Amino acid sequence: MSTGPIDNRLLEQLGIQREPTGKKRNDQLGQADFLKLMTTQLSNQDPFKPMESGDFLAQIAQFGTVNGITELQKSFQDFSSRIFSGQALQAASLIGREVLVPGSSTLHMAGDREQIAVELPNAATDVEVSVYTASGQLVDTLRLGPQSAGLLGVEWDGTDSQGNPVPTGEYRFEATVRNGTSTEAASLFIATRVLSVSLDRNRGDMRLETKGLGQVDFSDVRRIS
Protein backbone atom coordinates (compact mmCIF):
# COMPACT_ATOMS: atom_id res chain seq x y z
CA MET A 1 0.00 0.00 0.00
CA SER A 2 1.31 3.44 -0.86
CA THR A 3 2.73 5.45 2.03
CA GLY A 4 2.11 8.77 0.25
CA PRO A 5 -0.85 11.18 0.79
CA ILE A 6 -4.26 9.47 0.78
CA ASP A 7 -6.83 10.85 -1.67
CA ASN A 8 -9.77 12.60 0.03
CA ARG A 9 -12.30 10.72 -2.14
CA LEU A 10 -10.94 7.38 -0.94
CA LEU A 11 -11.28 8.49 2.69
CA GLU A 12 -14.86 9.64 2.04
CA GLN A 13 -15.74 6.25 0.53
CA LEU A 14 -14.46 4.61 3.71
CA GLY A 15 -16.32 6.97 5.99
CA ILE A 16 -13.08 8.45 7.35
CA GLN A 17 -12.95 12.22 7.68
CA ARG A 18 -9.69 14.11 7.39
CA GLU A 19 -9.24 16.56 10.24
CA PRO A 20 -8.78 20.26 9.39
CA THR A 21 -5.26 21.47 8.74
CA GLY A 22 -3.50 22.86 11.78
CA LYS A 23 -5.24 20.58 14.27
CA LYS A 24 -3.49 17.70 15.94
CA ARG A 25 -4.48 14.41 14.35
CA ASN A 26 -3.70 10.74 14.86
CA ASP A 27 -1.65 9.36 11.94
CA GLN A 28 -1.91 5.78 13.16
CA LEU A 29 -4.28 3.34 11.43
CA GLY A 30 -5.91 0.58 13.39
CA GLN A 31 -6.55 -2.94 12.16
CA ALA A 32 -10.09 -2.09 10.96
CA ASP A 33 -8.84 0.97 9.03
CA PHE A 34 -6.12 -1.09 7.42
CA LEU A 35 -8.57 -3.75 6.27
CA LYS A 36 -10.95 -1.10 4.86
CA LEU A 37 -8.15 0.52 2.88
CA MET A 38 -6.93 -2.80 1.55
CA THR A 39 -10.45 -3.89 0.54
CA THR A 40 -11.03 -0.60 -1.28
CA GLN A 41 -7.66 -0.85 -2.96
CA LEU A 42 -8.47 -4.36 -4.25
CA SER A 43 -11.96 -3.43 -5.45
CA ASN A 44 -10.74 -0.36 -7.33
CA GLN A 45 -7.63 -1.81 -8.93
CA ASP A 46 -7.33 -2.10 -12.70
CA PRO A 47 -8.39 -5.67 -13.63
CA PHE A 48 -5.85 -5.60 -16.46
CA LYS A 49 -3.11 -4.53 -14.05
CA PRO A 50 -3.94 -6.28 -10.78
CA MET A 51 -1.78 -5.88 -7.74
CA GLU A 52 1.16 -8.20 -7.72
CA SER A 53 0.70 -11.01 -5.21
CA GLY A 54 4.11 -10.19 -3.81
CA ASP A 55 3.05 -6.61 -3.05
CA PHE A 56 -0.20 -7.81 -1.50
CA LEU A 57 1.59 -10.28 0.76
CA ALA A 58 4.20 -7.65 1.65
CA GLN A 59 1.45 -5.30 2.88
CA ILE A 60 -0.11 -8.04 4.99
CA ALA A 61 3.29 -8.99 6.40
CA GLN A 62 4.09 -5.36 7.18
CA PHE A 63 0.84 -4.88 9.06
CA GLY A 64 1.29 -8.18 10.86
CA THR A 65 4.77 -7.14 11.95
CA VAL A 66 3.58 -3.79 13.32
CA ASN A 67 0.63 -5.41 15.07
CA GLY A 68 2.89 -8.11 16.51
CA ILE A 69 5.35 -5.57 17.86
CA THR A 70 2.52 -3.66 19.53
CA GLU A 71 1.24 -6.82 21.21
CA LEU A 72 4.77 -7.75 22.23
CA GLN A 73 5.27 -4.34 23.86
CA LYS A 74 2.05 -4.77 25.82
CA SER A 75 3.19 -8.22 26.94
CA PHE A 76 6.53 -6.84 28.09
CA GLN A 77 4.80 -4.06 30.01
CA ASP A 78 2.59 -6.59 31.79
CA PHE A 79 5.59 -8.80 32.50
CA SER A 80 7.54 -5.81 33.85
CA SER A 81 4.67 -4.90 36.18
CA ARG A 82 4.54 -8.45 37.53
CA ILE A 83 8.30 -8.47 38.07
CA PHE A 84 8.15 -5.15 39.93
CA SER A 85 5.32 -6.42 42.13
CA GLY A 86 7.36 -9.52 42.95
CA GLN A 87 10.37 -7.38 43.80
CA ALA A 88 8.24 -5.22 46.10
CA LEU A 89 7.06 -8.30 48.01
CA GLN A 90 10.61 -9.61 48.19
CA ALA A 91 11.85 -6.21 49.40
CA ALA A 92 9.27 -6.06 52.20
CA SER A 93 10.35 -9.49 53.46
CA LEU A 94 14.00 -8.36 53.66
CA ILE A 95 13.46 -5.64 56.28
CA GLY A 96 14.92 -6.80 59.58
CA ARG A 97 16.75 -9.74 57.99
CA GLU A 98 20.52 -10.22 58.12
CA VAL A 99 22.39 -10.22 54.81
CA LEU A 100 25.99 -10.98 53.91
CA VAL A 101 27.45 -8.38 51.54
CA PRO A 102 30.95 -7.53 50.24
CA GLY A 103 32.83 -5.19 52.55
CA SER A 104 35.88 -4.78 54.73
CA SER A 105 34.78 -2.19 57.32
CA THR A 106 31.77 -1.53 59.51
CA LEU A 107 30.49 0.74 62.27
CA HIS A 108 30.90 -1.38 65.38
CA MET A 109 28.75 -0.70 68.44
CA ALA A 110 30.39 -1.40 71.80
CA GLY A 111 29.31 -4.78 73.15
CA ASP A 112 28.24 -6.18 69.76
CA ARG A 113 29.73 -9.12 67.91
CA GLU A 114 30.58 -8.83 64.22
CA GLN A 115 29.91 -11.65 61.76
CA ILE A 116 32.19 -11.68 58.71
CA ALA A 117 33.13 -14.22 56.05
CA VAL A 118 36.29 -14.91 54.05
CA GLU A 119 36.16 -16.15 50.45
CA LEU A 120 38.66 -18.98 49.95
CA PRO A 121 38.96 -20.04 46.28
CA ASN A 122 41.31 -22.86 47.32
CA ALA A 123 42.26 -24.71 50.46
CA ALA A 124 44.68 -22.78 52.71
CA THR A 125 47.31 -23.94 55.19
CA ASP A 126 46.61 -20.91 57.40
CA VAL A 127 44.08 -18.06 57.51
CA GLU A 128 44.27 -14.90 59.62
CA VAL A 129 41.86 -11.99 59.98
CA SER A 130 43.26 -8.75 61.38
CA VAL A 131 41.09 -6.02 62.91
CA TYR A 132 42.14 -2.35 62.68
CA THR A 133 40.72 0.94 63.85
CA ALA A 134 39.79 3.58 61.29
CA SER A 135 43.21 5.19 61.86
CA GLY A 136 45.03 1.92 61.06
CA GLN A 137 45.90 0.74 64.58
CA LEU A 138 45.92 -3.05 64.95
CA VAL A 139 43.28 -4.15 67.46
CA ASP A 140 43.19 -7.94 67.24
CA THR A 141 44.24 -10.86 65.04
CA LEU A 142 42.04 -13.91 64.60
CA ARG A 143 44.15 -16.99 63.78
CA LEU A 144 41.97 -19.59 62.08
CA GLY A 145 44.54 -22.20 61.01
CA PRO A 146 44.11 -24.53 58.01
CA GLN A 147 40.83 -24.17 56.11
CA SER A 148 39.19 -25.80 53.11
CA ALA A 149 37.96 -23.88 50.07
CA GLY A 150 34.66 -22.05 50.31
CA LEU A 151 33.03 -19.27 52.31
CA LEU A 152 34.54 -19.28 55.80
CA GLY A 153 32.40 -17.72 58.52
CA VAL A 154 34.28 -15.76 61.21
CA GLU A 155 33.06 -14.02 64.37
CA TRP A 156 34.83 -11.13 66.09
CA ASP A 157 33.66 -10.70 69.69
CA GLY A 158 34.38 -6.95 69.76
CA THR A 159 37.45 -7.15 71.99
CA ASP A 160 41.13 -6.35 71.49
CA SER A 161 44.05 -8.78 71.71
CA GLN A 162 43.97 -8.45 75.52
CA GLY A 163 40.29 -9.34 75.74
CA ASN A 164 39.13 -5.82 76.51
CA PRO A 165 35.92 -4.54 74.83
CA VAL A 166 36.65 -1.90 72.20
CA PRO A 167 34.65 1.35 72.03
CA THR A 168 32.07 2.21 69.42
CA GLY A 169 33.65 3.23 66.13
CA GLU A 170 34.54 2.17 62.61
CA TYR A 171 36.71 -0.92 62.31
CA ARG A 172 38.37 -2.46 59.28
CA PHE A 173 39.14 -6.14 58.56
CA GLU A 174 41.90 -7.70 56.48
CA ALA A 175 42.18 -11.41 55.64
CA THR A 176 45.51 -13.06 54.91
CA VAL A 177 45.60 -16.50 53.31
CA ARG A 178 48.71 -18.66 53.29
CA ASN A 179 49.18 -21.72 51.13
CA GLY A 180 52.65 -23.16 51.58
CA THR A 181 55.10 -20.34 50.99
CA SER A 182 52.65 -18.03 49.16
CA THR A 183 50.59 -15.35 50.92
CA GLU A 184 47.70 -13.36 49.49
CA ALA A 185 44.73 -11.26 50.54
CA ALA A 186 41.20 -12.68 50.38
CA SER A 187 37.81 -11.13 49.68
CA LEU A 188 35.73 -10.28 52.74
CA PHE A 189 31.99 -10.18 53.41
CA ILE A 190 30.24 -8.55 56.36
CA ALA A 191 26.90 -9.50 57.89
CA THR A 192 24.57 -6.56 58.46
CA ARG A 193 20.89 -5.99 59.16
CA VAL A 194 18.50 -4.51 56.58
CA LEU A 195 16.81 -1.33 57.82
CA SER A 196 14.85 -0.35 54.70
CA VAL A 197 14.60 -1.11 50.99
CA SER A 198 14.23 1.22 47.99
CA LEU A 199 13.09 0.20 44.49
CA ASP A 200 13.67 1.93 41.15
CA ARG A 201 10.75 1.06 38.84
CA ASN A 202 12.48 2.39 35.71
CA ARG A 203 15.76 0.51 36.14
CA GLY A 204 14.44 -2.38 38.23
CA ASP A 205 17.17 -1.85 40.84
CA MET A 206 16.77 -2.72 44.51
CA ARG A 207 18.96 -1.04 47.12
CA LEU A 208 19.19 -1.98 50.78
CA GLU A 209 19.77 0.50 53.59
CA THR A 210 21.84 -1.47 56.11
CA LYS A 211 23.07 -1.04 59.65
CA GLY A 212 26.69 0.17 59.69
CA LEU A 213 27.29 -0.21 55.94
CA GLY A 214 24.84 2.25 54.40
CA GLN A 215 23.29 1.45 51.02
CA VAL A 216 24.21 -1.71 49.13
CA ASP A 217 22.85 -3.23 45.91
CA PHE A 218 20.63 -6.26 46.35
CA SER A 219 22.59 -7.96 43.54
CA ASP A 220 25.66 -7.92 45.84
CA VAL A 221 23.97 -9.93 48.59
CA ARG A 222 25.73 -13.24 49.06
CA ARG A 223 23.48 -14.74 51.73
CA ILE A 224 20.23 -13.95 53.56
CA SER A 225 19.66 -15.27 57.06
Image (tube, rainbow, N blue to C red):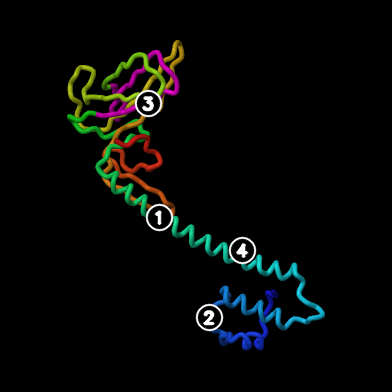
Helix, strand or loop under label 2: loop
Residue linked to disc 2: 24
Judge whether residue 69 is colored magenta. Answer: no
Residue linked to disc 3: 151
Give the residues in magenta: 114-138
Question: Residue 130: x, y in percent?
Answer: 32, 21
Front-lying residue, 33 or 117: 33
Residue linked to disc 1: 82
Asked if marks 1 and 4 touch (Cβ < 8 Å), the reply is: no
Of marks 3 and 4, which one's residue comes earlier in the chain?
Answer: 4
Question: Residue 120: x, y in percent?
Answer: 41, 23
Label 1 sits on what residue type? Answer: Arg
Label 4 sits on what residue type? Answer: Thr
Specify whether residue 28 is in view: no
Of marks 3 and 2, which one's residue comes earlier in the chain?
Answer: 2
- In the image, residue 182 sits, relative to residue 188, either above or below, namely above
Which dot marks residue 12? none
Residue sitting at x 27%, y 45%: 95
Label 2 sits on what residue type? Answer: Lys
Front-lying residue, 149 or 16: 16
The residue carrying pointer 2 sits among few (fewer than 14), some (14 to 19) or many (20 or more) residues within 10 Å by Cα, namely few
Asked if marks 3 and 4 touch (Cβ < 8 Å), the reply is: no
Helix, strand or loop under label 1: helix
Q: Main secondary structure of the magenta part?
A: strand
